[in-house]
Amino acid sequence: MKVIEVLIEYSIQSLNRPFSYLYNGKKNISEGFRVLINFNNKQIVGYVLKTYETEKSKEELQDDLGFNLEEIIDVIDESPLLNKDLLSLADQVSEYYLAPKISVLQAMLPPSLSPRRGSLKAPKIAYDQYVKVIDNNEEGLTAKQIELLRLLSQEDKVLKREIKSKAILDKLIEYHKVSIEKVEKRRLSLPNYSYHEPPQLTDEQQRVVQEFTSSEDEIYLLEGVTGSGKTEVYLHLSEKVLKEGRDVLMLVPEISLTPVMVEYFLKRFANNVAILHSELTPAEKYDEYRKIANGEAHIVVGARSAIFAPLKNIGLIILDEEHVESYKQDVTPFYHAREVAIMRGKMHHSKVLLASATPSLESRARAQKGVYHLLRLPHRINAQPLPATTVVNLADYRNLDRDSYMFSLRLRKEIRGVLDRKEQAILLINRRGFSSSVSCRKCGHVFKCPTCGIALTYHKSDLMLKCHHCDYVEKNPEICPECGSTYLMKTGFGTERIEEEVNRLFPEARTLRLDSDSAKIRTKIPQIIEQFRNKEADILIGTQMIAKGHDFPDVTLVGVVLADIGLSMPNYRSNERAFQLITQAVGRSGRSDKKGQAIIQTYIPSHYAITLAARQDYELFYRKEMEMRKIQSYPPYTFLASVTLSGKTEDHVIEGIYEVVDFLNANLQDEAIILGPTTPYIPYQGNRYMRTALIKYRNQNLIHDVLKKLLDVYRQKSGLSLSINIDPYNF
């Protein structure tokens, strides 16, 4: 008899503890296995934390423990899911982010291996069956059997499904003339690129590579202006690491950038590359995960979750565009790929390279203090100048185009020039859809998401109203539900509206749109990028997906249609986000031998985030923004943690959050600043009301101890759920 301690698949704090079961079977079972169990009269999946033998009977054990024990239903796996390094990493991530360990394990593993019930129906290994000749002796065979045997003998091996006569093949198998060989089938097809000869590194690139390889430091920040050749540095360093017999983990922030980076690495390293990101099918993820785990690929390129790739001997971890907030997961466990990369780097004694043209203030501050080793690429390849940038004040009527309230006279003129010169342009508006809200002119009713309470966006392409937070969808209304009026007004504009306006003003222009709507069909992202790169379109319109990482040689104009979006958001990072987005977008222009320019349209042209982004002056922005952060006690001068309480009854939640704040004040006293309680930007989600408190602190150990006590208190409270987000980006 074995006692099995398991974590159950529900990733909520109240169930974040081991549950005991019994096993009396003969299958192998140890830490890291999944088991099928009965929990609260439901069959679910458990993850084994510990097993031990016992001589006691079930009744004796129950008497000792003081509760009833059930036997597990079945052992799912034949071997542990994770190696010791990844198990240790799961413990570190769970501890640092105060997240249920099961949620970390579920984030680490592909759907087919995840410790949750749905994994049992997820895709497993797929095989191709080949027929192979093992005996050419034709004695005793019929003419038809000899014919097939001779045909098969002429080939090395043939797919079984390609053989028409199953009966004859079965006889040859029965007579041991041929055998069936199963070969694992890969369901992800990567392009076959010819080898790309590495270009000669510039003096600046060589200096960076030399400084990186000769230093004993563990964490590096590469600050390189847009177009300075950071990608070639990644490739060069990766080649050195591979020659040492070690592995490379290459992260990009957006799925839209993954195909581009995969192409660079495939051209240099061919079949030694695997990819991992959320847009792969479960079957593709499973195949790529096993390919990595089996040591068949030593380079992994992927988005945030690829930080958990099962590489065994990591020598280098790279985070491209390290400033992008998509590296931070916005659901439990609230991990940041940068921090997990540093954890993995220490475990593998490998170097971590963070890179960006506009590093996050936290990373740059750490580099200034010497925590990170700062590397710089201050100039573009071949000394190409940065784009000439013009800020257009939309509040000045003299700049407005009477025929279009979206485009200024200057932007319209420059688009016309690009089209006449047969060059290309990018137009950025960081808002998708056609109109940002729909309201009633008569009574003022605004159509809002019933789940989140935020305004629904009108999408003209399918005549639907959509929530950009939870993906709620409803048909475009014809009447106001409050007053019955048919006078409905659409306000604001997004990528769809910009595309329509471009087609109206420039009917001869060929346009493409890239946002999370046009990219819902997963093959569309690389397809749209490739079409634009091949000059099958003149103008690319999109959101932040087009603002970073792409290299289009014929783009000579970038237009930021409305730079103000996001600046008014109630978040201490809003200035930083605006600066980074504009800087990255402007950097898409003039990357080849053609001179580039950028037009930034704004209603607040004097805002330093906009003026300094136009000048590509990161240094001055960093100094000004750090002054603001210091005054307000925000990172990097403090750490943050947000505590969110949710429940189905609003009064219950409000009462509870005040108790939370009282608990924090009593236990932290002068060690932290408690802000709140407040109503979050999205106050209602999944039929649950939400309230938040924010903690600013310097002593991480003390805060973690207090927050653990708080979690213990709320494990016992019914009707309320408490979640903690360490280093939150949104609150």
Image: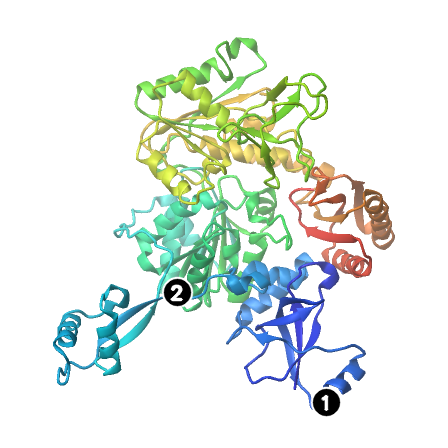
Residue toward you, 260 or 682: 682
Residue at the far bottom in the pictured view: 55
Residue at point 77%, 47% (across, down)? 648
Residue under circle 2?
126
Give how far apart the Cα atoms at labels 2 and 1 are.
Answer: 43 Å
- Quadrant of the rendered structure where residue 250 is? bottom left
Report which quarter residue 246 is drawn in.
bottom left
Locate residue 429 relative to residue 730 in the image: left or right.
left
Within 10 Å of disc 1 (Cα), the crowding (few <14, some 14-19, many 20+) is: few
Residue 339 picture location, percent across and down: 59, 55
What residue do we see at 48% from left, 29% from top? 461
Expressed as whole percent of the image width and height from the top left, the position of residue 703 reads: 76, 55
Disc 2 residue type (three-letter): Ala
Secondary element under disc 2, as helix, strand or loop, is: loop
**Residue 214 visible in image:** no
Residue 728 in the image: x percent, y percent? 66, 47
**Rendered view: 721 above or below 446:** below
Q: Is residue 281 left or right of residue 471?
A: left
- 289 and 457: which is toward the camera: 457
Q: Which mark is residue 56?
A: 1
Q: Is residue 447 above or below residue 66?
A: above
- Binning the other alpha carbons within 10 Å of mark 2 as few (below 14), some (14 to 19) or many (20 upward) gives some
| Amino acid at pointer 1 | Lys
Q: Is residue 274 visible?
A: yes
> Depth check: 101 or 729 in front?
101
* Residue 218 numbered mark, or none: none
- Quarter of the figure with the C terminus: top right
Image quarter hosting the N terminus: bottom right
Q: Give the mark nearest the N terminus, 2 or 1.
A: 1
Label 1 secondary element: loop
**Residue 555, how many percent across, how many down?**
37, 29
